[in-house]
Amino acid sequence: MKHIALITGVTGQDGSYLSEFLLAKGYEVHGIIRRSSVDYRERIAHLEGTPHFHLHYADMGDSMSLVKLVDLVQPTEIYNLAAQSHVQVSFDAPEFTADVDAVGVLRILEAVRTNHLEKTCRIYQASTSELYGKVEEVPQNENTPFHPYSPYAVAKLYGFWIVKEYREAYGMFCCSGILFNHESERRGETFVTRKITLAAARIAQGKQEKLFLGNLDSLRDWGYAKDYVECMWLILQNDKPEDFVIATGVQHSVREFTDLAFRHVGIELKFEGEGIDEKGICVSGPEHLVGKALVEVSKDFYRPTDVVNLWGDPTKAKAKLGWDPGKTSFEQLVKLMVEHDMGKVAAEGAAEKVRTNLAEYLEKGIVK
Ligand code: NAP
Ligand code: G4F
């Protein structure tokens, strides 16, 4: 049988890794893109134009576009990754978040039913550890009660339940992966890990003075996105449709992530003070930085309600899917992100230098 995957959210962190993974497995991969004023799709630019990789305009808010696309593509698997995925932004745009992250899931399920593909098309829903929110137990597994604690999590809770409902009501093979935080060198730059690794690289290279963060005590179970997309696929290859927690089983604080990222660029920090007054002072590293507060806390990055104790139990995924949660350790993850961002910042510097030199040469008439 020909394997045809439709990925919503193909331009995102996970969509880009999943595309590479499925193409390597011989799938025909179709992805949904939105019209944007900037047309460069950084994470999948290297895939565009390659055989078996196709992009189509559609939108999670536009039922007709989804129905028509499912008809055109006739997918055997759908990976519904599209979302307004930033928790803090969901407090500013709650209605848009609900439309895409909640009703969008229903639109995908209905597009499959409308095209009579419910017996042949398997559907993966990108669910989230944010469902546990104001956590009722640690660590969290598939039986832990949900307590969503942001507009994003409430919308994703609808997505989780509507998938379960369609599975039971119509016998569809649709499942949710309850994924804990997963990061990478392709992570969006306003999520806390990437914000930290980019800032550490910029501070080390003299391009930024300070890093402002919110709650440093917040605890997360951080894994590597490349390892997690394999699990999305495994969930759809299982013999029956089930929901799975995907996590590493190891927990760290935002402060620990920061400390380790700065160590990788040769800066040792000592955290002093509490709450909003806490600061990360440079105690060893480049001479001009020693004694300076490089990390400070800003209320701007506090959330009206914050999820502070996420810690997943991947026992079921390990046992039933044979997935290895320890493939990439926390230490390896921080290292690979920092190394990537040191290179990125250095390259930005080089490009800037070329632009400055060019401007100067043009002004002096050295080049025309
Ligand atoms: P991401 O990088 O923010 O990517 C989100 C994707 O959704 C982008 O491709 C975006 O397209 C697309 N999108 C947003 N609104 C859309 C709309 N109205 N119509 C069509 N596409 C739309 O997110 P990610 O980190 O890859 O996460 C993938 C999924 O897993 C999301 O559903 C997220 O909520 C969920 N999740 C993520 C994590 C994590 O730690 N990363 C953990 C649990 C669950 P544009 O590029 O056009 O904006
Ligand atoms: O990196 P974050 O923004 O990720 P968050 O809120 O956990 O959400 C991510 O993971 C979820 C899975 O649990 C996904 F469903 C979701 O789509 C997204 O991918 O924040 C992590 C923690 C929070 O407690 C936040 O309050 O870090 C804390 N934090 C502290 N300072 C900060 C900052 N978060 C951000 N974004 N920026 C800060 O300056």
Image (cartoon, rainbow, N blue to C red):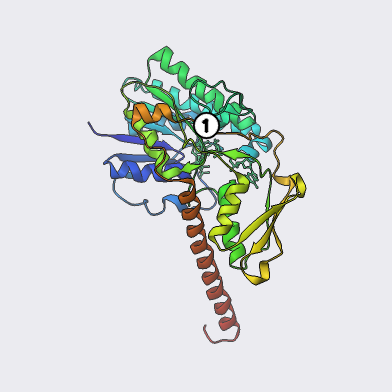
* Image: 141 above or below 273: above
* Residue shown at the point (75%, 49%) measured from the top left: 273
Image-quadrant location for residue 65 = top left
Q: Which residue is mark 1?
A: 128
Residue 250, image x, y percentages: 50, 38
Q: Is residue 71 visible?
A: no
* Residue shown at the point (50%, 67%) measured from the top left: 347
Is the CB of mark 1 within 8 Å of ligand 2? Answer: yes
SS at mark 1? Answer: strand
Q: Residues within 10 Å of mark 1 (few under 14, many from 20)?
A: many
Q: Is residue 180 left or right of residue 304?
A: left
The kind of residue tagged 1 is: Thr
* Residue shown at the point (63%, 47%) measured from the top left: 255
* Image: 164 above or below 271: above
Residue 241, image x, y percentages: 37, 21
Image-quadrant location for residue 1 = top left
Q: Is residue 126 left or right of residue 269?
A: left
* Residue shown at the point (26%, 41%) measured from the top left: 26
Residue 172, image x, y percentages: 38, 19
